[in-house]
Image (cartoon, rainbow, N blue to C red):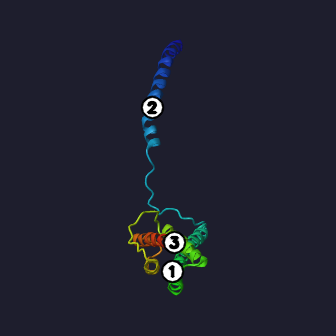
Amino acid sequence: MLMWQRNHTTLLPGLICTIAFAAVLLLLGSFPVYSQTRSAPPPPDDRPAKSDKDDLGSDIGSHEREMRARLALRSQKKLYEENLARARETSELATQLLDSYQAKKSFNSEDRKKLERMEKLTHRIRNEAGGTETDIEIELSPVIETAMKSVAETADDLRKEVEKTPRHVISTTVIDQANKLIGLIQHVRVLSR
């Protein structure tokens, strides 16, 4: 029995070292595998993306999105309708001013206010179309009646262009016509002083 104890005591530290060494090797060997599985992206999911539906199948938030989209469309349509109204009013004012000038051969204070109003409306039309202030070359007549005829024709052309241009389109023709009309109005205002 003493012999077994002596062998057992000499074997025990070697056995413990062997087990500890094997455990360290297992831990070190599994670390690269563990780190590879942690850094790899998850596999792609074949299921369709989760929608905003709860377990009962009702849409959460879709009603709000739909209402916002409708409000945005209404707002855009309202802006477009306002721009059409501006173009129509500009054309009407130009016709009124031409008739008034042809009847009296001069402008009164009310006519000058109409010219100012036309210029402001035309600026708004140009700005809504995406235009900015640019210089455009225009043939300017020194005769006020001829200049007023050009204003009336250009205002009518602008109205037609605004009416045929869809609301989602930026038209360079509308911008050019508006710039031309602004130049003509300013010229008539200078001549009428």
Number of residues whose C-alpha sits closer than 10 Å to that of mark 1, classed few (under 14), some (14–19) or many (20 or more):
many
Q: Can residue 177 be seen in this view?
A: yes
Residue at label 2? 26
Q: What residue type is labelled 3?
A: Arg
- Nearer the observer: mark 2 or 1; the answer is 1
The location of residue 156, given as percent across then percent down, is 45, 81
Residue at label 3? 189
Residue at label 1? 94
- Label 3 – label 2 distance at C-alpha: 95 Å
Is label 1 in a helix, a strand or a loop? helix
The location of residue 135, given as percent across then percent down, is 42, 63
- Label 1 – label 3 distance at C-alpha: 13 Å
Q: Which amino acid does label 2 sit on?
A: Leu
- Label 2 – label 1 distance at C-alpha: 93 Å
- Nearer the observer: mark 1 or 3; the answer is 3
- Nearer the observer: mark 3 or 2; the answer is 3
Number of residues whose C-alpha sits closer than 10 Å to that of mark 2, classed few (under 14), some (14–19) or many (20 or more):
few
Is label 2 in a helix, a strand or a loop? helix
Q: Earlier in the sequence, mark 3 or mark 2?
A: 2
Camera-nearest residue between 151 and 45? 151
Q: Give me the disc on residue 193.
A: none
Is label 3 in a helix, a strand or a loop? helix
Determine whether 98 is above or below 29 in the image.
Answer: below
Q: What residue type is labelled 1?
A: Ala
Q: Which residue is drawn at 38% across and 67% down?
A: 137
Residue 93, by quadrant, is bottom right
The location of residue 49, given as percent across then percent down, is 49, 62
Camera-nearest residue between 153 and 43? 153
Camera-nearest residue between 85 and 28? 85
Q: Do the residues labelled 2 and 1 touch (CB within 8 Å)?
A: no
